[in-house]
Amino acid sequence: MAITPEEVRRIAELARLEIPPEREGRMVGELSAVLEFVATLDRLDLAGCESTSFASTATPLRDDVPDGRRLTNDQALEMAPSREHGFFLVPPIVENVNP
Amino acid sequence: MNRADAWRHSARATAAAVRDGALRAADAVESGWEGPGRTWEDSVHAMVHADPAARSAGAASVAAGPLAGVPVVVKDNLCTTEYPTTCGSKILAGYRPPYDATVIRRLRAAGAVVTGKGNMDEFAMGSSTEYSAYGPTRNPYDLARVPGGSSGGPAAAVAYGLAPIGLGSDTGGSVRQPAAFCGVFGLKPTYGRLSRYGLVAFGSSLDQVGIFARHAGDVALTYEVLAGSDPCDATTRPGAAPDVSGWDSGVRGLRFGWPANLWAKSVDRDVIDGLEEAAAALERAGAERVPFDFLPGEYAVATYYLVATAEASSNLARFDGVRYGFRHPDGDDVRQLYVKTRSAGFGPEVQRRILLGTYALSAGYYDAYYLKAQRARTRIRREYQDAFARCDFMLLPAAPTLAFRIGEKTEDPLAMYLSDIFTIGANLAGIPGLTVPVGLAPSGLPRAVQLLGPEDSEPALLRAGRALEVRGDGARLARTHETEFPWPTKR
């Protein structure tokens, strides 16, 4: 199944990526080729097959007790590209906010 | 054993010499850098982060454990406090984690020293180590060829002698396929046997830390050190890991599956020759061959490229230029910050897979793609269960070809994906797999076979791997000749 340039732009928007116009045609072709290959699954008999999401079967439980591992505020911020007053600093999130 | 020749020895022998005081840990660690490292590293480019001061600090205080003084090459997606952890990506350039992965902590507790970080395809997405933002790694057996991937750096470094052990990660074959291309052992354990805490996530239901070594006994030794449940990773299996101490006890009485329909077409003659020689060797050693047909690998590849990309699109959402790594300077608002940072920070293959996964999960396509793949995964698991009702493990190729040429598949993503056709099924089913080198082809390139077994079958896989441990001339490697290995030669 082929994917259209409009669909590629839509999923790029969802994934917070931008595909430059000169690479868009190639991306459409490559994704279409993979999706055509994936259609191989239409030939597989899946009668009686529920979905598997994890290979393991049981969720291990433990007592809800803190184990002492923690990052300090400084450690958490140490690798941030920009920080201020103990917080991550980012550009404006909300538009039209009066300074 | 001394500083000049320690690099030729197994991890087991090196650790014994260090514990006995016959070899200093610093000499054990520097041996690989001063010997084969000088010959090979500039041309192979297996390593992305190395630091003599960090090595020397590590060697100064090694524990007297089973890996005392043993240098280990670690893939660059495992968090280490003394080296950057960049996942082969620009988006993590310079990132230094504030904590060590559980497997790194266990290595250190056993006396091992991280000797550097190995190169990889960006975020482990690739089969050739050509998609690293820090340049490709080359195969030491032929510098015009790839080492495989995505853990190509650790595989190449172990093959040329920098260290006797490497750690990689295997989401669809990223340990087993480069092990085959570089002629070393490569174990992907049962899902959940090794902790993923501190392994940068790609496909969380598929990812598993794996082990490279030149000798089956060193794989067993490292597995014993690393395997076991971890309170920091809720997907680790509870209870004790299987006992692999019988790795050298032979294969008498074991049955191995022989799914010859899988290599009836599109598999190189050299690969088939290696399989047939390995099967004959196992039979001579007392194992029984059980022929049957198995589900063709195309279905597993198709399933994988929906499941793994869907999980990746979710896992890689965290790279947004806010908390760590690269931030694009031009983001005027936070949305533009995300878009510009991710578009400039991720390479083309990572962007391709994020888009594919986002598509498979998006409204209107979820049932047709992701849900169908999850159901196919169940079918594939059942196929393995049926097969292992008839045998203890299966013998099959690790890859359809020997190491391919640099540039051969980079323009055709689907062709690259199909180089994992024999390894992907194990990740979908959560079962262990072991790549076993079986000497060199007439071209001088390494050959290998793969063994796949049911959950927790690592003991049987290692027994068989040991039985197949061969020199280049096909003779069984005696334990007294452990420094012998079909080492690459510079040409």
Image (cartoon, rainbow, N blue to C red):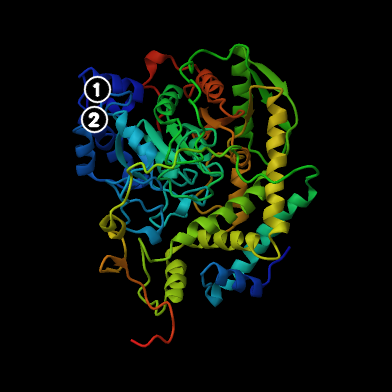
Which residue type does callout 1 highlight?
Val
Label 2 CA crowd tier, 10 Å (few <14, some 14–19, many 20+)? many
Residue B89 higher or lower than B146, as above or below = below
Please provide percent x and percent y for residue B429: 63, 38
- In percent of the image, x 46 and y 49: which residue is there? B129
Residue B316 higher or lower than B6, as above or below = below
How far separated are the C-alphas under marks 1 and 2? Answer: 10 Å
Please indicate whether residue B489 sits to the left or right of residue B449 in the image: left
Residues at circles 1 and 2 in contact by the CB criterion of under 8 Å: yes
Please provide percent x and percent y for residue A8: 62, 70
Which residue type does callout 2 highlight?
Val
- In this orientation, does residue B112 appear? no
The residue beneath circle 2 is B62
Label 1 CA crowd tier, 10 Å (few <14, some 14–19, many 20+)? many
Residue B161: image quadrant is: top left
Q: Secondary structure at mark 2?
A: loop
